[in-house]
Amino acid sequence: MGTRVRRILIATDGSEKVKNAVDWGIGLAKMYNAVVSAIYVIPPSGVALAMRGEMWSKALENHLQDEGRKATEYVVAAGRKEGVEVEPVIVEDKTPTDGIVDFATENDVDLIVMGTLGKTGLSHILLGSVAENVVRHSKRQVLTVP
């Protein structure tokens, strides 16, 4: 990379599969003395509201907020162990792709680090890939980690 890396965005969903990407992101941040933002994106709850009602939608929102805090705090703790500053960020009411790409653009992020789930075949076609969509739509460098 020919440019200086000052800000790294690590996208997390809190799953075991993303931990390798967290390790890579924290390692790069330590090497470049970069600041890290750990992002968790909560999609719009309109579908849940339409399907189950307001009470169910609020419970889902609270659950996702808790999951987001846990996921970003994992990255904060990993950074703390390595002496890397990590800012936890929870973005609401956007698709994961839009939340990641928009945050990276708005906050002058130099590198996005994210894991891949390794879906292939029909599940990849039906579900798509957040990592793939971020790579396609981001104007920032993206490192995908299997």
Image (cartoon, helix red, strand yellow):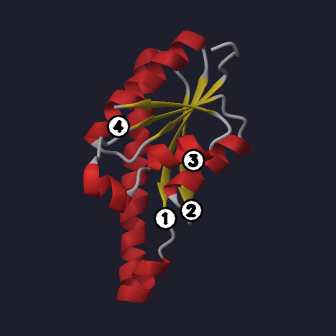
Type of amino acid under label 1: Pro
- Residue 135 is tagged as none
| Residue 98 horizontal side relative to residue 67, left or right | right
Residue under pointer 4: 18
Discs 4, 1 touching: Cβ within 8 Å: no
Disc 2 from disc 4: Cα separation: 20 Å
Type of amino acid under label 3: Ile
Residue under pointer 2: 94
Sooner in the amino-acid sequence: mark 2 or mark 4: 4
Type of amino acid under label 2: Lys
Look at 40% across and 67% down and name the residue there.
62
Disc 2 from disc 3: Cα separation: 9 Å
In this picture, is 47 found above or below 114?
A: below
Check disc 1: other Cα within 10 Å, few if <14, some if 14-19, many if 20+: some
Disc 1 from disc 3: Cα separation: 12 Å
Sooner in the amino-acid sequence: mark 4 or mark 1: 4
Type of amino acid under label 4: Val
Residue under pointer 1: 43
Check disc 4: other Cα within 10 Å, few if <14, some if 14-19, many if 20+: many
Q: Position of residue 96 (x, y in %)?
A: 50, 55
